[in-house]
Image (cartoon, rainbow, N blue to C red):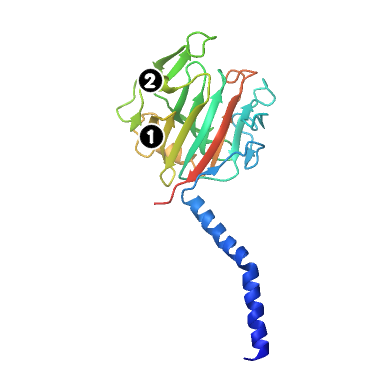
């Protein structure tokens, strides 16, 4: 064999051996990224700082974003910034999502008007899963919330009968449901079922599934294992929901957001909502 060719062959073999781990690592990384895109759970919060999140870039309905931080025990919290100022807003994921499942734990103080926002823009507008932990509140049903057009899909709510007793919640139908036809929600729990699983002074686990391409998603929400609702925004007969108006304001994809409501009436000065164990997985496109 030509000694030069033999030398080159040995050298090339050495290069391949040297870089084989890096090459396989690259392919493994590609496969891991693809797996994540196709359904692996990814953590949204590292328990240390706000990496992966940002406050809304455009001040809008509730303020410029409110105040967000991480407590010493590694829990994320939101409050008005500064407290009692009336300035709220949303904390948004850096990444955008369309079809996905989201799981998180939440522990709201009594009094805040909060929510988990889906397909949200930089003004903090989008679809909201209620976290209204106050009198005449609701946790787990849906609202479309934008400055130009908003619609509540809230079938019932709760109020505290004794301000000093967290477990003194009493359920009542929302007065705005009196003209609802059958089928506004494809599925919804009863007020009694909701009350049986909600822990008013402890951590609660929420799961949200958002599916459907285009501007009108299907939302499914669970709280502590109870399926709270399934809303098909493309077919709901809600009498106050105008799809033409909604088309002008909703997005096909957007950030996941956590809300601090603006104004003095919707957020007590010393109140916070706490969040932890947030994770998401993108659903495979069908």
Q: Secondary structure at mark 2?
A: helix
**Residue position for label 2:** 191
Res 109 → quadrant: top right
Q: Nearer the viewer, residue 173 or 229?
A: 229
Tell whether 276 sits left or right of 175. right
Name the residue at 62% across, 72% down.
16
* Along the viewing direction, whichever of 191 and 9 lies nearer the viewer: 9
Quadrant the N terminus occupies: bottom right
Instruction: Identify the disc placed on residue 231.
Output: 1
Q: How many marks?
A: 2
SS of the residue at dot 1? strand
Point out residue 278 in the picture as x, y percentages from the top left corner: 54, 36
Quarter residue 17 falls in: bottom right
Asked whether residue 19 is in view, the answer is: yes
Left or right of residue 187: residue 35: right
Please indicate whether residue 18 sits to the left or right of residue 27 in the image.
right
Q: Which residue is depicted at the point 55% across and 35% down?
A: 277
Which one is nearer the viewer's eye here, 227 or 134?
227
The percent position of residue 225, horizontal first and vertical second, equals: 41, 30
Residue at coordinates 57% horizontally, 30% vertically from top-left?
Answer: 275
Residue 223 placement: quadrant? top left
Q: Which mark is residue 156?
A: none
The answer to whether any part of residue 252 appears in the image is no
């Amino acid at each position: 064999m030509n000694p030069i060719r033999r030398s080159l062959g040995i050298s090339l073999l050495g290069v391949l051996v040297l870089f084989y781990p890096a090459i396989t690592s690259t392919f493994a990384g590609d496969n891991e990224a693809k797996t994540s895109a196709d359904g692996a759970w990814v953590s949204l919060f590292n328990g240390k700082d706000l990496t992966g999140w940002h406050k809304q870039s455009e001040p809008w309905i509730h303020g410029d974003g409110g105040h967000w931080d991480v407590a010493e025990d590694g829990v994320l919290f939101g409050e008005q910034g500064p407290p009692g100022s009336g300035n709220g807003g949303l904390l948004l994921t850096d990444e955008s999502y369309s079809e996905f499942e989201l799981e998180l734990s939440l522990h709201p103080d009594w009094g805040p008007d909060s929510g988990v926002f889906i397909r949200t823009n930089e003004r903090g507008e989008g679809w909201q899963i209620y976290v209204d932990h106050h009198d005449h509140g609701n946790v787990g049903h849906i609202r479309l919330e934008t400055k130009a057009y908003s619609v509540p899909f809230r079938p019932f709510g709760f109020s505290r009968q004794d301000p000093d007793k967290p477990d003194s919640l009493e359920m009542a139908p929302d007065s705005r449901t009196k003209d609802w036809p059958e089928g506004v929600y494809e599925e919804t729990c009863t007020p009694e079922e909701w009350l049986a699983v909600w822990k008013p002074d402890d951590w609660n686990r929420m799961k949200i599934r958002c599916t459907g391409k285009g501007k009108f998603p299907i939302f499914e929400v669970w709280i502590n294992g109870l399926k709270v609702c399934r809303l098909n925004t493309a077919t709901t007969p809600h009498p106050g929901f105008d799809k033409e108006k909604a088309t002008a304001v909703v997005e096909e994809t957007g950030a996941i957001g956590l809300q601090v409501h603006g104004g003095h009436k919707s957020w007590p000065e010393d109140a916070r909502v706490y969040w932890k164990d947030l994770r998401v997985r993108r659903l495979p496109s069908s």
